[in-house]
Image (tube, grey):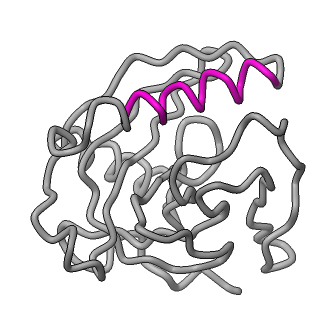
Amino acid sequence: MDLHQLPPSPSPGLVNLIVEIPAGSRNKYEYSAEAGVMVLDRVMHSSVRYPFDYGFIPNTLAEDGSPLDAMVIMAEPTFAGCLIKARPIGVLDLHDKNVYDGKILCVPDADPRQDEIRSIRQIAASQLEDVAEFFRTYRTLQGSVVSIDGWRDLDAVQPLLDSCINAAD
C-alpha cells in the first residue's frame, strides 16, 4: 500500500483518511510506510476501545512527527487500511507530553445520512466528551501526560491541515 501519490485533500472541503483502527477495536494498528502495510502495534487495556474509526491523513506531518490524526464517524466500523473520503467538521485540541497532537473529526462523504453535518456543533456533546475521555484514559494507562484543550469548529481545520501539508513537503 503505497500512499505517496495519494493527496491529503482530493478536493476542497474533503480529506483522504486512511483508517488504522476501526471503531470498537482494542487492537492498535499503525501504518508502516517502510513495509507498506498495517502493523499490529499493541493490544490496549480491555476497558479502552476506539470510539470512532481512527487513522491519519496521508502526506501530512503534524507537530508530533507523525501524519495528522483524524477520526471519522461511521454507522458501521470499516477496517484497517480503508481509504475514506471524509468531510472535516472540527478539531480536538490535545497536547501529549507537551506536544500539540490535534485530531480532526470527520464524517464520510459517501454516507448520505450525514450530508447535512457541516459543524462540530451538530454532534452531541456527550459523544464529543466520549472521544475526549477515550484519549484521557488511553494515554493515562500508557503513563503519558495528556491535556485536552477542547473542541474547535470547522474554521480551525483548514489552517491545521495546511500547516501539516506544508510540513510534509
Residue 81 percent location from the top left of the image: 65, 77
Q: Does residue 81 appear left or right of residue 74 in this picture? A: right
Please say if 67 is above or below 97.
below
**Of the pair 156 and 108, the residue shown nearer to us:** 108
**Of the pair 11 and 129, the residue shown nearer to us:** 129
Q: Does residue 57 appear left or right of residue 88 in this picture? A: right
Please check the rendered image and state whether residue 72 is part of the magenta-colored stretch, yes or no: no
| Corner quadrant of residue 13 | bottom left
Q: Does residue 99 appear left or right of residue 164 in this picture? A: right
Query: Residue at horizontal 50%, vertical 58%?
Result: 60
Please say if 40 is above or below 2.
above
Query: Residue at horizontal 23%, vertical 78%?
Result: 11
Query: Residue at horizontal 47%, vertical 18%?
Result: 148
| Corner quadrant of residue 166 | bottom left
Start-end of magenta stretch: 128-141
Which quadrant holds the N terminus? bottom right
Examine the residues drawn in magenta and state their main secondary structure: helix
Residue 157 percent location from the top left of the image: 27, 46
Q: Does residue 159 appear left or right of residue 148 in this picture? A: left
| Corner quadrant of residue 96 | top right
| Residue at the left extreme of this rendering | 116
